[in-house]
Amino acid sequence: MTTVLDATRVLAERARRARELVVDMAASPRGCHLGGSLSVMDILIAALERANRDEGTRVVLSKGHAAAGLYAALHVSGVIEENPAPVYGLPGSPYTGHPGPKVPGIAFPTGSLGHGVPYAAGWAMALKLGGRHGLGVAIAGDGELQEGLVWETVQVAVARRLGNLVIVVDRNGGQNDGLVADISPLPKLAERFTAFGCDVLEVDGHDLAELSAVFADDREGADRPLAVIAATVKGMGVPAVQGRAGAHYVTIGEDRAEKWKRTIR
C-alpha cells in the first residue's frame, strides 16, 4: 500500500530530476528563465500528477517564460518521452522559450503574461457547462498579477461560480526588472482574492505533500474559484542562485551546469 510519505518521495525525486534538466537548459546557447522555472517546479510536479490521473483536468502555465520548467516537469512526469534539454531552443525544436502547442501535455500555449488565467477559466467553464469532472488549473507568477486581465478573469469566474477553477500564484517575490515589492507591491494579497469572491489558501510552494493535498480536492459542490498563494523561493534547489534576483534569466557553461547539478537535493 502506497502511503502519503511514499507518494511525496516519488514526487520529490521527480522535482529533483526536473531541476537538473532546467540547469541543463540554462547551459544551452540561449539559456533559459532559470529562477522562475526552479521556483515553480514543485507546483508543476504536483499539478501534473493530478492531471495525469484525471483526464478532465488541464494545467496551464500562465507564467509562460518558465517553459523550461514545464518541459522538464512534463518529461519526468511521463507526459513527453524524449528529454527536452538537449534540443531546447534549437531551430525547429518544439521546446521554445514559451510553451507551444506542438508539445504533448500543453493544451494552451502561453506567452504574454496574464493570458493563461482566462484559458484555464475557459476550460473550467466548458467542464461546468458540459457537466464534466475536472479542474482548470492556472499557474501564475506574482509579478504577473500586475496584468489587469488576471483580475478581469477572476471577476468573471466568480460571477460564473467556477468553483473548479484553481489559480496558483508562484509567489517568489521577483520579476524581470527586480523585486515585485519595489515595482508594484501586492499587499494583503489573500484579502484581495477574498474581496473578489474567491476561496483562498496560503501554502508552502515547496511542500509537495501540502501541494498534493490542494490538487487532490475535486472541488465538487464549490461555487467559488480557489486562489492558492504559494510562497516560493526564486532559484529553489540550486544553492548558487537560490533567492537571487539575478537568477531570472541565466546562460551558463556546461562545466558550471555540472557543478550546480551536483548540489541539487
Image (tube, grey):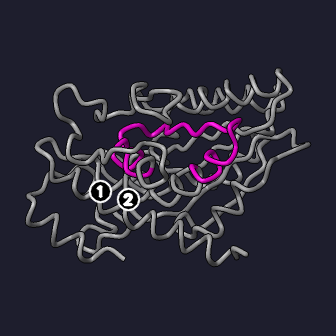
Residue 198 disc label: none
Q: Name the kind of residue labelled 1 in the image.
A: Leu
- Residue drawn at point x = 59 percent, y = 26 percent: 119
- Toward the right, the furthest residue is 221
Asked whether the residues under the numbered discs 2 and 1 touch, taking CB atoms below 8 Å apart as contact, a structural biologist would say yes
Q: Kindly state the secondary structure of the residue where label 1 is placed.
A: helix
Q: Nearer the viewer, residue 134 or 33?
A: 134
Q: Residues within 10 Å of mark 2 (few under 14, many from 20)?
A: many
Give percent across and percent down for residue 140. 52, 43
- Residue drawn at point x = 24 percent, y = 46 percent: 32
Q: Name the kind of residue labelled 2 in the image.
A: Ala
Q: Kindly state the secondary structure of the residue where label 2 is placed.
A: helix
Horizontal side, residue 6 vs residue 174: left or right: right
Residue range (magenta): 48-73
- The C terminus: image quadrant: bottom left
Horizontal side, residue 255 vs residue 199: left or right: left
Give percent across and percent down for residue 111. 39, 29
Main structural element of the magenta stretch: helix, strand or loop? helix
Residue 18 disc label: 2
Q: Which residue is mark 1?
A: 21
Relative height, residue 171 to residue 239 (above, below): above
Give percent across and percent down for residue 41. 45, 57
Question: Distance from label 2 to label 1 (Cα)?
Answer: 5 Å
Relative height, residue 199 to residue 244 (above, below): above
Residue 62 within the segment the image draws in magenta? yes
Q: Nearer the viewer, residue 102 or 23?
A: 102
Q: Quadrant of residue 64?
A: top left
Residue 258 within the segment the image draws in magenta? no
Q: Residues within 10 Å of mark 1 (few under 14, many from 20)?
A: many
- Residue drawn at point x = 87 percent, y = 44 percent: 220
- Residue drawn at point x = 67 percent, y = 27 percent: 123
